[in-house]
Amino acid sequence: MADRPELEITRRGVLASGAMGAAIAVAPGAAVAQNAPEPQAPPTMPVRFKVNGRPQQLTLDTRTTLLDALREHLHLTGTKKGCDHGQCGACTVLVGGKRINSCLTLAVMHEGDEIVTIEGLGTPDKLHPMQAAFVKHDGYQCGYCTPGQICSAVAVLDEIRRGVPSHVQADLTKRPAASNMEMRERMSGNICRCGAYSNIADAMADVAGVKA
Amino acid sequence: MRAFTYERAKDAVEAARIVAGRPDAKFIAGGTNLLDLMKLEIETPTHLVDVQDLGFDKIEKTRDGGLRIGALVTNTDLAADERVRRDYGVLTRAIVAGASGQLRNKASTAGNLLQRTRCPYFYDTNMACNKRKPGSGCAAIGGYSRQLGVIGVSNACIATFPGDMAVAMRVLDAAIETVDGGGQKRSIPIAEFHRLWGDRPEIDTVLKPGELITAVTLPRPIGGRHFYEKVRDRASYAYALVSVAAVIQRDGTGRVAFGGVAPRPWRVEAADALLPQGAAAVTARAFQGATPTRDNAFKLPLATRALASVIAQAKA
């Protein structure tokens, strides 16, 4: 690579050329638009909700997902965008105490809601017990899915406490136990490309006070 | 995603009237399926009517001893309801076999019934798909059809209804309550709710434009042992290749419906009657006239084996 600098691809270079490509692609359309009727600005709407206890007021393009509102508008970038289609769980946040995929819900649907993200669970000085357990048990490698894993894990233990049933429960009329099988099943909506699953289950067992 | 305007409905009839009057408008409840499809521009509504404030979020006893499940009850809340777990176990089992914890917390009862197919050609906008673009053809026929339908399909479309919850509701003889923009209410038996594709695969259900689901009712409990056996490519968070919902009584009689095989939850009442004769007798009748492809012919013996497993558990 070193003797062929023209082939040396940097992250910045890719981003710059990507932006240039976009500019070229847009130009012909813009020229046509001069003769066409003025394109309408996309509809926007105000929305108010609480994020990590703080009231927030935003005016957003109606298409803005809760995930993009958190990341791009409130700059809470702990919540991650993985697949953006509800398949990977990296965007998991708590809304009204329940875990959801923030990529598959519109911000404007959350008027008045209370949202908790990874930034609201704990701070570097005062970790949430689940955050501390992930550190202790090495429940991650690259860390990209980790905020979603931790939000999901906190909610899973709460769901087990509240008696929400699962696919691996033998008797539906009994209360579920915080077993390894239960946690693995309930965490199936959070994908970890590095494969830290067994350590994540250990961290959850530690917080739940059970053997992994 | 295409731009759209958004409003939160305060009244069910008004919401139905708005959507009936605009072919480009859609209801949104949980949004977990619709927003996914809007991002891919498979669904392109220009107006969304959010129905979350309409109060259809309760599960109540009906006068005849059954349950009325509000259209907005989340999948999690429905599966967790004490009465459902006790008297309609097949329904809890089916719900918790589907999607992920996050999705079940947001997905609604009505939305689950209305979820669109997961046929890969429906999702790939570069491919011909009569369901996505009427008249464009069906790339699934002669294509990769391992996940697709084996019965009730047509020359225009071989997609399946992908859900689990509705398969259990079919066994329980549920009915879907709706209201339209004129305030007219009706109750649709679940057996008639999902269409067979025929030559109009773009229409999934018998709902009229703007007709809004308000509730799903379950008749009084029928007792028996409840099962939902789901066979899939991974142990959790995957669509069914074949699923079996069954309620089996002590004397070996019962009811059975299959998921992952047809445009609707697949139940043939004449096949139910053969349950005491064993799984092979039931599936021979239920899948009479099946038209599998080379890729998905395995679903027929798989359905027999999944049902055999259920019958064995019922006898144990």
Image: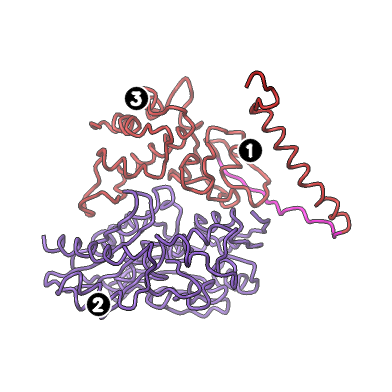
Chain colours: A red, B purple
> Residue B281: which quarter of the image?
bottom left
Q: Which residue is disc 1 drawn over?
A: A72
| Residue B10 visible in the current orientation | no
Amino acid type for the residue under numbered disc 3: His
The residues colored magenta run A36-50
Say if labels 3 and 2 share a chain.
no
Q: Quadrant of residue A179?
A: top left
Query: Distance from label 1 to label 2 (Cα)?
Result: 55 Å
Q: Secondary structure at mark 1?
A: helix
Query: Which quadrant of the figure contains the C terminus of chain B?
Result: bottom left
Q: Pick the residue in front: A83 or A154.
A: A83
Chain ID, mark 2: B
- Subunit of label 1: A
**What label sits on residue B271 in the rendered view?**
2
B200 falls in the magenta region = no
How would you rate the neighbour count of disc 3 (Cα within 10 Å): few for under 14, some for 14-19, many for 20 or more? some
Inspect the image, locate mark 2, and give the three-letter code of the amino acid beneath it. Ala
Indicate left or right for B123 with A211 as reference. Answer: right
Report x, y in % for residue B155: 48, 75
| Relative horizontal placement of residue B288, taking residue A44 as reference (left or right) | left
User: Which residue has dot 3 on it?
Assistant: A137
